[in-house]
Every structure is written in C-alpha cells, then in structure tokens.
Image: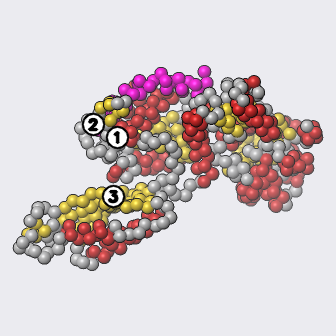
Amino acid sequence: MELSQRILAYIDQHREEAYQLLLELARIPSPSNHEEKRAAFCKEWLTRQGVQGVYIDEALNVVCPIGPTDGPLTVFMAHSDVVFPDTDPLPLKVEDGLIKCPGVGDDTANVVALMTAAKFIAQEGLTPAQGGMLLVINSGEEGLGNLKGSRKIMADFGSQVTEFVTLDGVDYGITTGAVGSKRYRIEVLTEGGHSYSKFGNRNAIAYLASLIDALYMVKVPEEGKTTYNVGLVKGGTSVNTIAQDAEILYEFRSDRRENLAMMEEHLMAAVAFFRTKGARINLELIGDRPCSGDVDPARHKALMDRTAAAVIIDKAEAEGVPLIFFNRQPVAEDIQRWSQIYYVGASAQESGALQGRLVLDAWRQNQEELDRNGDGVLQYAMLEGEPGHQDALLRTEYSVKTLTDAGVEVEKLANDTANWNRAQAAARVGQWLEEFGGQIEAVLSNNDDMALGAIDALEKQGLDRSLWPLIVGVDATAPALEAVASGQLYGTVLNDGRGQAQAMVDMALALWSGEDPAQAVDLEDGHYVWLPYRTVTRENLDELREN
C-alpha cells in the first residue's frame, strides 16, 4: 500500500483513539508559562507509543526529533497553552456533537493531531528524505507567554530551520503573514490620601484615565492593519481613598513593522506628557512579538504553494468539480484526498537521473579532458530552481545520486538557487567563477534557462572554450537546443510539454463527457499521467528536431 493510502487508512482506524485523547488532554490545565502538567502528559503518552528521543526543554516545549537534527530542519508546531488561567482541571462536556471546553479548539485539537502524526511516524519507522524534522508541542503562545516556546526552538535550532509550520485554531486555511504586537504594563503612582482630608491630591486613576483617553486618540496608519486595546484596568484602595496607584495592560498590533514603531512613538509621547504633570509613570514591556520580517519570497511561495493544494482540493470536491494539476506535483497525500484529482507531468526524479546520466556518459568517454586537475574527482556546481519546489529538490538529488551510484567520486564546489531564471543564474555563476575559476568541471542546472545563464557568465568572463565546464540542463527549450547545436551546452533532458498539454485536453474531454479518463489516457494509480523524459545531445539533436 502506498504511504498516502496508509496514512488515510490510519486516520480512519484511529479516529476514536484521537477523540478519547482529545477529551483527556483538554481537561488538563495549561495556562501560559505553567504548561508543566500538559507537557508531562504529552511526553509520557508519546513515549508509550514508541516515539523515540522525546524531551521537554527549559521552556516547557515537548520536542520530538525525527531524523537527523544536525542539518536542515522542518518544524511543525502546535501550542500546549490555553488562554484561560485555571490551574484546576478544565470543565468539559460533549453536547449536540460538540466538545465544549476552554481551549479545546485553540489549540488542543491540533496538539492531538500532531501527537497522532508522531505516533504514525514512529510506528512506520519513517524519516525525512532530506534533512530532519521537529514535531513540537510548544509553550507560551497565548497571552503573556510572549512566544516563549517558539523563541526557545529558534534559539536552539534557528540557523538550521528551513521551513516552519504551526497548526493553530479551528478555521481551515493557510496564514502566511505574521501579526506583531507589543504589550505594556503601565503603572501610575501619586501621593494619594483620604478623599476628604487630602482632597486635591493627585489621583492615579484620574491620571491613568486621561492617559487612556490620549492613547485612544491616535489615528492608526492606513497601510496594513493596526489595532490597539486597553484590556485590563486595576488600582485604588477604597471608595474613600484617593488612589495612589493604578495600572493598565495595553497592547497594539500590526502586520507592518513601521506601524508598530509609529504606535510605540505615540505611546512614549503620551507617557512623557503625563510625566510632566507630576505623576510617576512606570512602563514595563511584557510582550514583544515580531510581525513578518524579511523572508526569501521564493521559498515562502514554494511552501505556500505546496500546502495550498489541499485548500483547492477541498473546494473542488465540495462542488463536485474534477481537478487536473500539471507540472507542479502536489504531495501524494493531497492527490489521494479524492478520486477525481489528477496530475499530468513528468517524473522529476527521472529527469534528474537522466541529467546525471548525461554527465556520467561524458565522464566515462572523456574523463581525461574533463578531470582538469587529474584527481579522479568530478568537481561540480549546482544551479537549483525554486527553493522547496519538488522538481528542484528531486532533480538536484538524483542527478548527483546517478553519478555516485555509478562509482564516480564527486565534490560540490558551489550550489545556490536561481529560481529558474537566466539572469539570476548568470550572476551566481559569475560569482563562482571569481571564486573557483577553472576548478569547476561541470555545471548541473535544474532547467535550461539557468544553464543558459551559466553560458552567459562564461562568455562574459571571456574564458577560452577549452576551459569551460561541462554544462547540462533540463527542458529542451528552443534556445537550449541551439546551445546544444553550438556545443556550448553539452546536453539537456526533454520535458514533453506538448504531450502534457495533449494529455490534459484528452482527460478534460473525457471528464466533461462523463467517461472514464483511464480510457483516454494512460492513468497510473488512478491519478497520475506520466510523460517520459529523454536525453538530448548533439548526437540525436537532428532526430529530435525532425520529430
């Protein structure tokens, strides 16, 4: 049975177990910064299910490492704390098909999903194909937790984290931007006194009320979304006492850093003004959550796209509209969600292997010329496509694997993403030529446009053609075929775009007419149409052009 089918079967078989786990976990109190009881329960449960290496860190995160943790890491999180301050067992009842309990949806249900996934991974003995993974039941997400758990994970593993996904709330959707906030405790102190005998003394509550009014006079920026709130007020002693102390909890939020800065300036100006009136005002920052910062837009988009397929599929299934994906393959779990989801494309693994075969054949036929330093090792550079794109990952992996499986010793001198773009690739290779010069013996590119960018960089350097590295691409685009003909590009791998288009048309017509699409196309596993790749060199170029 395919992994995706085993996952779906596991979910169906363990629904009752997950339900009972949710009922038990939801009752355990877990206010922010006091998640000890729930963390201990989760660790013990996971250990009983066979999950190895589970530990609770100093921040009360429950951490499940999957695979190696000394390299790139993908992090999946769901938070253990709830917004309610109770330290006694939380009240729970099941009524009209609903579980009613403080925090059960935010975020206890997602914690159960994460724990169930950890159990499945452990039972199946699964490890990531690339890098490692952390499943984290994190602390300190709500209220004044100030992201304690997330900060600890980033402090310990931040430089290794390549992708970060957190499961939160009950609304099904994908959020890609972070809302930042700052939270302050503002305390006003005055001399106070008896309301009759010391009448006229400054009243801390009155000053604080005026300060609140000033804070609420601000006009929020029009760009982005910015909000503010005074959520708690307390102070004074009695009805006949001039209040000598009062405090509020005040926050402002925004999805833009510059707006957070503006709101803080307004707060500081208001506090400074009231300090001139003789009141003592203490300001304590009790929460500081960053909003979206500088991220790699291509890698961000790749992560969004991979996860967005599930949302599209659910909408299509609800309307009964068949879906045909092409060229960018959704994960297998999504394809298996519904019987009328299809994918038309070519195997990225195959294209990588064929590209590796091109280099392998050249190495075997002409090693003496390619191995410039005579060390018997192929020194190469890799131009990768879009970060996180499945085709880029597989082409990168299997091109090199084909060489090493054949006994070729290789050394990677450089690699970088160029987002399938010729100009970006030219810039990358230009930098590598400055650093490595003639040491690069081969350039493997995830597509033809980037391979052409490598050629542009070599021409700009004015290197003699005899000193050029071997260059290979993927796609067999028209400009690439011209480069093959001229000898600048050693070879490429044909991605049959015309065949893919024809398969999509044939399948769409079959679905429209109510026929079985398997009668119109060669359908594998009920979902996939694979178009074969083929290598292209100067030797078979004329044949390809004729066809």
Q: CA distance from mark 3 to mark 2?
A: 26 Å
* Residues under numbered marks 3 and 2 in contact, where contact means CB atoms less than 8 Å apart: no
Vertical order, 410 against 45 (above or below): below
Q: On the rendered structure, is 329 left or right of 460?
A: left
**Which mark identifies residue 286?**
3
Q: CA distance from mark 1 to mark 3?
A: 23 Å
**Which mark identifies residue 103?**
1
For discs 1 and 3, the disc positioned in front in the rendered view: 1
**Residue occupying the point 58% across, 50% down:** 300
Q: On the rendered structure, is 448 left or right of 108?
A: right
List x then y, in percent, for residue 513.
Answer: 72, 29
- Residue identified by numbered label 2: 90
**Residue occupying the point 36% across, 48% down:** 142
Does the stretch in magenta take in 526? no
List x then y, in percent, for residue 337.
Answer: 58, 30
List x then y, in percent, for residue 452.
Answer: 80, 52
List x then y, in percent, for residue 6.
Answer: 56, 24
Sequence-first tag of 3 and 2: 2
The amino acid sitting under disc 1 is Gly
**Residue occupying the point 82% across, 54% down:** 455
Q: Main secondary structure of the magenta part?
A: helix
Q: Which structural element holds mark 1?
A: loop
Q: CA distance from mark 1 to mark 2?
A: 9 Å
